[in-house]
Image (cartoon, rainbow, N blue to C red):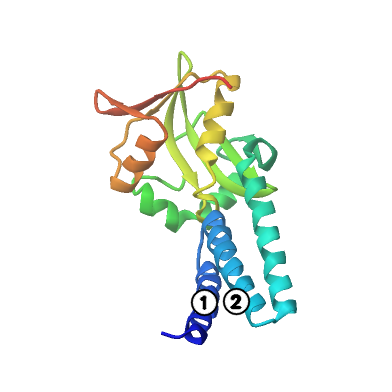
Amino acid sequence: MNTSMLIELTGYLGSILIAVSMLMSSVIKLRIINTVGSSIFAVYALIIHSYPTALMNFFLVAINVFNLVKLVKKDTSFDMIESSSDDGLLNYILDYYFEDIKKYFPEFQRKPSSPDQAYIVCCNGNPAGVLIGKNIGDGTFDVVLDYSVPAYRDCSVGGYLYGKLPARGMRTLVYSKEADEVHRDYLDRMGFVKEDGKYVKRLMET
C-alpha cells in the first residue's frame, strides 16, 4: 500500500467517524467520536494542504472539548428540581419518554401510586433525568423510577442526584422491584448492594 492510498484512507476514516457520531443518542459518545473523527480529518486536510478544511475541523475539536469539559463539571451543568406527581413538567417527561421508560422499567405505571416525592434533573435547562419514589421513613427512599433520558444516559445524572439527596433528608435508597440485566448493571455501577432481595444504596452527603 503506497503513501497516497494511506492518506486517502485517513480521510475516509475521519469522514466515517464524523458521520457515525451523528447517529449517537448519547451526547458524550457523540462528542467523543466526533472529536476523534474531526482530529483525523483535520490532519488529513493539512496533509493535502486544504487549510480551510483543517481550520474548520480543529474548530470543531475545540467546541467538542469545551462542551465535554462542561458535561464533566456536573455541579455547573446540572440542576435538581423538586416535583410532584401532578407537576406539568414531570408528566410531560413521563409521556414523552414513556416507551423508552418501559424498556428499562416494564412494571412502571404511567400514574405511579401516590409517590411521596419526585425530582427532575435538568442539564443546561434540558430535562436529563427523573427520580420518583416514596419516603418510607428514617431517611429511606423507596425508588419507583430512576430514569435518565437517552441523550444524557452517560452524563452521571444518577451520581449528581445521589449527591444532592442527603441534603433533602435522604440517607438510603431502596429499589425493591426485580431488575433486568441492563438495570442491574446500572445499579451495580452506582453502588447499590443486594440485601434481602432488594437493592440498597447508602447515601453520603457531599
Give the mark nearest the N terminus, 2 or 1: 1
Q: Nearer the viewer, residue 61 or 147?
A: 61
Circle 2 SS class: helix
- Residue lying furthest top in this view? 138
Q: x%, y% of residue 78?
A: 65, 40
Q: Nearer the viewer, residue 39 or 135?
A: 39
Question: Which residue is found at the position 55% from the left and 58% from the top?
Answer: 32
Q: x%, y% of residue 27?
A: 57, 56
Q: Quadrant of residue 142?
A: top left
Question: Which residue is found at the position 65% from the left and 47% from the top?
Answer: 69
Q: x%, y% of residue 100?
A: 44, 56
Q: Nearer the viewer, residue 39 or 94?
A: 39
* Label drawn at residue 49: none
* Label drawn at residue 10: 1
Q: Amino acid at mark 2?
A: Tyr
Q: Amino acid at mark 1?
A: Thr
* Label drawn at residue 44: 2
Circle 1 SS class: helix
Q: Are marks 2 and 1 in contact (CB under 8 Å)?
A: yes
Q: Is residue 117 visible?
A: no
Question: Which residue is found at the position 52% from the left and 51% from the top?
Answer: 149
Q: Nearer the viewer, residue 3 or 43?
A: 3
Quarter in which the N terminus is drawn: bottom left
- Separation of disc 2 and disc 1 at Cα? 6 Å
Question: Which residue is found at the position 55% from the left and 33% from the top?
Answer: 161
Q: Is residue 119 above or below residue 98?
A: above
